[in-house]
Image: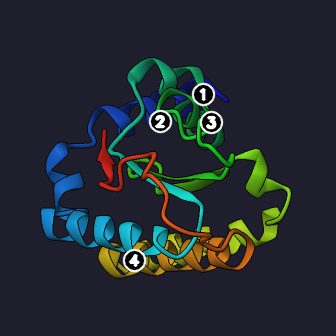
Amino acid sequence: MSLGQKIRRAWRHLTSSNADAQRAFPEATLTAISEAITAGEQTHRGEVRLIVEKALPFDDAWDGVTNRQRALALFADYGVWDTEDNCGVLIYINLAEHKVDIVADRGIDRKIDRATWQAVCRTLTEGFKAGHFHDATLAAVGQVNELLRQHFPANGARANELPDKPLML
């Protein structure tokens, strides 16, 4: 990455505001997402975690940390990997970069291929381009829940291992 590209990228992340993130994901949207995650988890053994980040930390933006690298770090930092059946899924949204990534734990990764996850990511990015953050995110959560329902159907009552409320960073 050239110096000019590094400066533009770092500036984009520095100037991303909390207000922009709150406009994209107001409290009503966060509540609807949380409810969709909770309802979906009643039908499968997976654990879904959604993290929305307004911008990377400056050092990460400057150092060229990719969206995937950041998603993997958050997957580890927030314990999405640490579920009973190894079936945690992180949906990561980076608002400053207009990028999304999905990281699935090894139990799920064996059953659902990368192309399928990329289709879910396209649901998000295409919806976001049109300004439909609420609807696109709910549609993507629905897709993830359906995939988990197909491959990891519920087998009785179980504890909720990860918070269902989206995390705003």
Where residue 39 sits: x, y (%)?
Answer: 39, 75
Q: At label 1, which amino acid type do we have?
A: Gly
Where residue 72 sits: x, y (%)?
Answer: 62, 36
Where residue 135 sits: x, y (%)?
Answer: 35, 82
Asked if the residues shown at circle 1 and circle 2 are in contact, with their CB atoms under 8 angstroms apart, the answer is yes
Q: CA distance from mark 1 to mark 3?
A: 15 Å
Residue found 60% across the figure and 80% down from its top: 146
First of labels 1, 3 by sequence position? 1
Find residue 72 and name its label: 3
Asked if the residues shown at circle 2 and circle 3 are in contact, with their CB atoms under 8 angstroms apart, the answer is no
Q: At label 4, which amino acid type do we have?
A: Leu
Choose between 100 and 130: the one closer to the eye.
100
Q: CA distance from mark 4 to mark 1?
A: 30 Å
First of labels 4, 3 by sequence position? 3
Asked if the residues shown at circle 4 and circle 1 are in contact, with their CB atoms under 8 angstroms apart, the answer is no
Snapshot quadrant of residue 76 = top right
Q: Is the residue 53 above or below the residue 144 in the image?
A: above
Residue found 45% across the figure and 35% down from its top: 8
Q: CA distance from mark 4 to mark 3?
A: 22 Å
Which quarter shows the C terminus?
A: top left
Q: CA distance from mark 2 to mark 4?
A: 29 Å
The residue tagged 1 is 64
**Element class at badge 1:** loop
First of labels 2, 4 by sequence position? 2
First of labels 4, 1 by sequence position? 1
First of labels 1, 2 by sequence position? 2
The residue tagged 4 is 138
Q: At label 3, which amino acid type do we have?
A: Leu
Q: CA distance from mark 1 to mark 2?
A: 9 Å
**Element class at badge 2:** helix
Asked if the residues shown at circle 4 and circle 3 are in contact, with their CB atoms under 8 angstroms apart, the answer is no
